[in-house]
Amino acid sequence: MIEDPTRTEKLERAKKQVAEIKGFYIHLIIYIIINLLLLLVAMGVFSGDRFRFGMPSWGHFTTPFFWGIGLFFHGLKVFGSKSKILKDWEERKIKEYLEKEDETLNKFK
């Protein structure tokens, strides 16, 4: 049985997309866990000084901030800059305009 090459290509692209989505969610989980641990360390939970909140240092903010920027761009790469809702809306609008154009052309025939 000969397999359709376009089907095989689609399957490979789908597998790649699923792997990229899985990689993003793993990245997100690691981001949350590590930043929670950093927050607990900053609070002094592991040092015996329970919940010491002094003046926060910039280090407490820079790691989650810059890593969060990286995570954001990772998400854009994986999911695309356009959401599914926006893509669906664009497709509907394109179809709508094409149908109007066809109706206009058919009126003059």
Image (cartoon, helix red, strand yellow):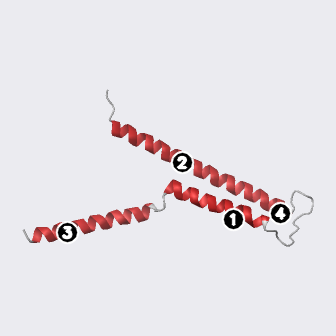
Cα–Cα gap, marks 2 and 3? 39 Å
In the image, which disc is placed on residue 65? 1
Please tell me which of labels 3 and 1 falls first in the chain: 1
| Disc 1 element | helix
Badge 2 crowding class, 10 Å Cα cut-off, few under 14, some 14 to 19, many 20 or more, is: some
Q: Identity of the amino acid at label 3?
A: Glu
Q: Is residue 84 above or below residue 10?
A: below
Q: Identity of the amino acid at label 4?
A: Ala
Q: Which residue is mark 4?
A: 42
Determine the residue positioned at 34% across, 40% down. Answer: 6
Left-right relation of 97 to 9: left
Quarter of the image that includes the N terminus: top left
Determine the residue positioned at 63% across, 59% down. Answer: 70
Q: Where residue 78 sits in the image (x, y, percent)?
A: 52, 54
Determine the residue positioned at 42% across, 65% down. Answer: 86
| Disc 4 element | helix
Please tell me which of labels 1 and 2 falls first in the chain: 2
Q: Which residue is mark 2?
A: 20
Q: Which residue is mark 3?
A: 101
Q: Where residue 63 sits in the image (x, y, percent)?
A: 73, 61
Determine the residue positioned at 65% across, 61% down. Answer: 68
The furthest residue to the right: 48
Please tell me which of labels 3 and 4 falls first in the chain: 4
Q: Where residue 32 sits in the image (x, y, percent)?
A: 69, 57
Cα–Cα gap, marks 2 and 4? 32 Å
Cα–Cα gap, marks 1 and 2? 23 Å
Q: Identity of the amino acid at label 2?
A: Glu
Q: Is residue 30 above or below residue 81?
A: above
Q: Identity of the amino acid at label 1?
A: Phe
Place residue 51 in its image quadrant: bottom right
Badge 1 crowding class, 10 Å Cα cut-off, few under 14, some 14 to 19, many 20 or more, is: few
